[in-house]
Image: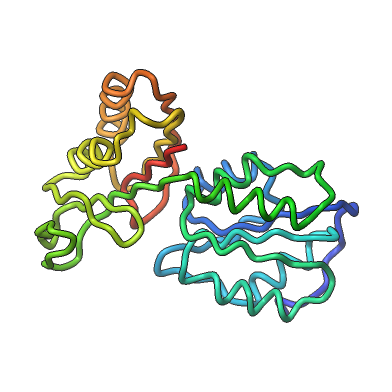
Amino acid sequence: QNAFEVKPRKPHKKYGIVTVASGNGIKDTFTSLGADVVIDGGQSMNPSAEDFVEAFESINADTIFVFPNNSNIILTAKQAAALYSGSDVRVVANKTIGEGYAAISMLDTSNEDVEAVLAEIDEIIASVVTGTVSKASRDTEKDGVAVHSGDYIGFVGDTIYVDEPNAEEAARKLAEALHAEKYDVMLFICGKEPSAEAAETLFRELKQSYKRTEIIMIDGGQPVFDYLMILE
């Protein structure tokens, strides 16, 4: 099947949303927030420009906002936007699932000024912190933290905060390091590796530790990242 084949178009609207995610729980969450198309992809699983163009084709909108949710995917999304002339495609240079979640959940689709909407998206993204817990693949030292292969690191962007032998302890220490108590909301997303029991126990502990922060748990099912903490 040709990725550029024109499919039956949906009813016309002002704005459309395309985003990228892996894990059924995260993908379902983006759909419930209003994403028209959630392309399968993420860390080490980059979608192609054709995937994006096919997504654009399926949306009948004046302007399409694209949230790549990963720094490795931004360039491909921009290349696809340049290839497609059916809509005004705007690629938001967001680098994490957390930024995409916050921006899409607060997107003001009633505002007809595209530039104003983009400015608001940038503001939202700047206010979000995405903490990630993932298994380390090699020994290294970074940001004053000794990282051991097979341990779990807690990081934000390129900055490593903690290294712990298990994912749950790394998540606890990362929440401390990021001063989770200062935020109003934490979206706590569990990956496919942690057991449901371990994730549920950690969720209860976080709620106990950060009582003023509203903590929402989602079974994301994503590979690679054991836990994501989106702080707003």
Q: Position of residue 123 (x, y in %)?
A: 58, 48
Q: Name the residue located 71 percent from the left edge and 79 percent from the top edge.
A: 82
Number of numbered discs present?
0
Considering depth in this image, is 114 or 59 the residue closer to the camera? Answer: 114
Picture quarter containing residue 179?
top left
Q: Position of residue 70 (x, y in %)?
A: 47, 63
Task: Establish if 205 lies above or below 124.
Answer: above
Q: Position of residue 229 (x, y in %)?
A: 38, 41
Q: Name the residue located 41 percent from the left edge and 40 percent from the top edge.
A: 189
Q: Name the residue located 57 percent from the left edge and 41 percent from the top edge.
A: 29
Task: Establish if 200 lies above or below 57.
Answer: above
* Residue 220 placement, left or right of 144: right
* Residue 193 placement, left or right of 150: right
Considering depth in this image, is 155 or 55 the residue closer to the camera? Answer: 155
Picture quarter containing residue 212?
top left
Q: Name the residue located 14 percent from the left edge and 54 percent from the top edge.
A: 151
